[in-house]
Structure formats: C-alpha cells, structure tokens
Amino acid sequence: MIAIVNYGGANIASVMFALERLGIKGILTIDSDLIANADHVILPGVGAAKSAMMQLHEHCLVDCLKALTQPVLGICLGMQLLFKQSQEGNIDMLNIIDSTVNKFDKKTCEVIPHMGWNTVSFNKPHPLTQNITNENYFYFVHSYRAETGNYTFGKTDYGTPFSAVVVQDNFMGCQFHPERSGNAGAQLLKNFTEM
C-alpha cells in the first residue's frame, strides 16, 4: 500500500493519477497509523513551507514521518520539507537532511519561479533513478532551492546549482514533478514503488 500524505499539497490529484497510470493505487490519508504501516509513503506538495508544516503539526504527523523506515518520496515542496530549515517563512522543517532551502537569487535568475523543463544531472547512481538517462528533462515549478551536499544524487542549474534529487537513508526527494515529467517521471515513480 502506498500512503499519500494529505497535508494540502496542490499536486495530490496529479500524483494519484500518475500512479493509476502505472496500475498502482495510492491511499490519500492523514492517519498516522496508515502512514506508519504503509509499504511506501509519498509527500506530495505544491504550496508554502510554513502552511505545510503547520498542517503536519496540526495532524501530529511530524514525529510519525521522521520515524518512518520504509521508502519515502518527497515531491517538490515535499522534498524541501525533508530539510532542516527554509528561508520561506524561516520555518523549521522535518530536519531529516541537515541543510537549508533558500530562495533563488534575483541577481542570478532571470525569472522566479523556476518554471518549465530543465535537465537533471545524476551524479550518483541510485535505484530511484535507474533506467533514466542522465541529463533527461523534468518539469519544475518552484521559487526556493535546496542546497547541494552529500545527499545530492541529482542536480540542476538555474542561475546556481541546486539539488534536484536527494537521498538520506530511506528518504528520497525530487524537486521536479515526476507526475508531470512524461516517461522519465513515470519511470522514477515506478522505480520508487518497486523499492
């Protein structure tokens, strides 16, 4: 069973449809017992870090999420929530990855948000990205970027390099939207569900 955490992310329906196209049914839930006992957990997300963390605290999901040992995939804002802190509202997040999420710099970026197709360079192999060509295009929509570090398994450049794919133990994340990224995105979701 795949639990999709329902904390108000705007891309929830598209994630569910993308899984259905793969023949996989996800359960949308805020039930901590269902999440804790799921085979896989997806943290979707389009929105603001502060309101997302408020929802997770309100539903008593922070400790539940941090304690998960099964494969967990954060998408877009869901990936950013894995980090320690975000400049977006200067909010403390899940602190699974000890690094920060910062706003794109207007001095180096022509347009904010970073929106549209961009390539991802996979700098380390991982089961999440197997059978996906290096420098493949994925679809992005975001104004904040995760710093790069040892947890970075794929990066993209938009004025400055940032983490596009992160891995910390059983927690994984992608800044792009696999559910909107064609065959490459579908492959990533498939890889995740087979882990």
Image (cartoon, grey):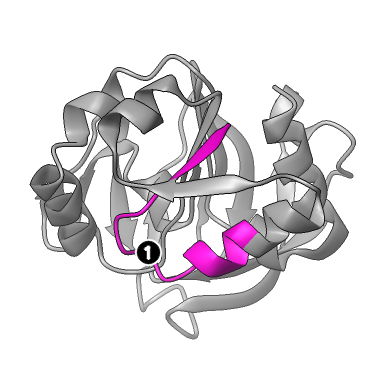
Q: Give the quarter of the image for residue 154.
A: top right
Crowdedness near tag 1: few (<14), some (14–19) or many (≥20) residues, C-alpha within 10 Å: many
Q: Position of residue 186 (x, y in %)?
A: 79, 52
Q: Nearer the viewer, residue 115 or 38?
A: 38
Q: Is residue 89 left or right of residue 29?
A: left
Residue appearing at x 37%, y 64% in the figure: 9
Q: Give the quarter of the image for residue 71.
A: top right
Q: Is residue 3 magenta?
A: yes
Mark 1 lies on a secondary structure that is loop
Q: Quadrant of the C terminus?
A: top right
Residue appearing at x 39%, y 56% in the figure: 77
Q: Nearer the viewer, residue 85 or 81?
A: 81
Q: Amino acid at mark 1?
A: Gly
- The answer to whether residue 181 shows anywhere in this view is yes
Q: Is residue 28 magenta?
A: no
Residue appearing at x 86%, y 42% in the figure: 132
Please say if 185 is above or below 108.
above
Please say if 86 is above or below 71.
below
The residue indicated by pointer 1 is 9
Q: Position of residue 35 (x, y in %)?
A: 38, 31
Q: Position of residue 49 (x, y in %)?
A: 24, 58
Numbered disc total = 1
- The answer to whether residue 96 shows anywhere in this view is no
User: What segment is highlighted magenta in the picture?
Assistant: 1-16
Residue appearing at x 26%, y 66% in the figure: 48
Please say if 166 is above or below 181.
above
Q: Is residue 81 left or right of residue 26?
A: left
Q: Nearer the viewer, residue 122 or 15?
A: 15
Q: Quadrant of the N terminus?
A: top right
Q: Position of residue 118 (x, y in %)?
A: 70, 66
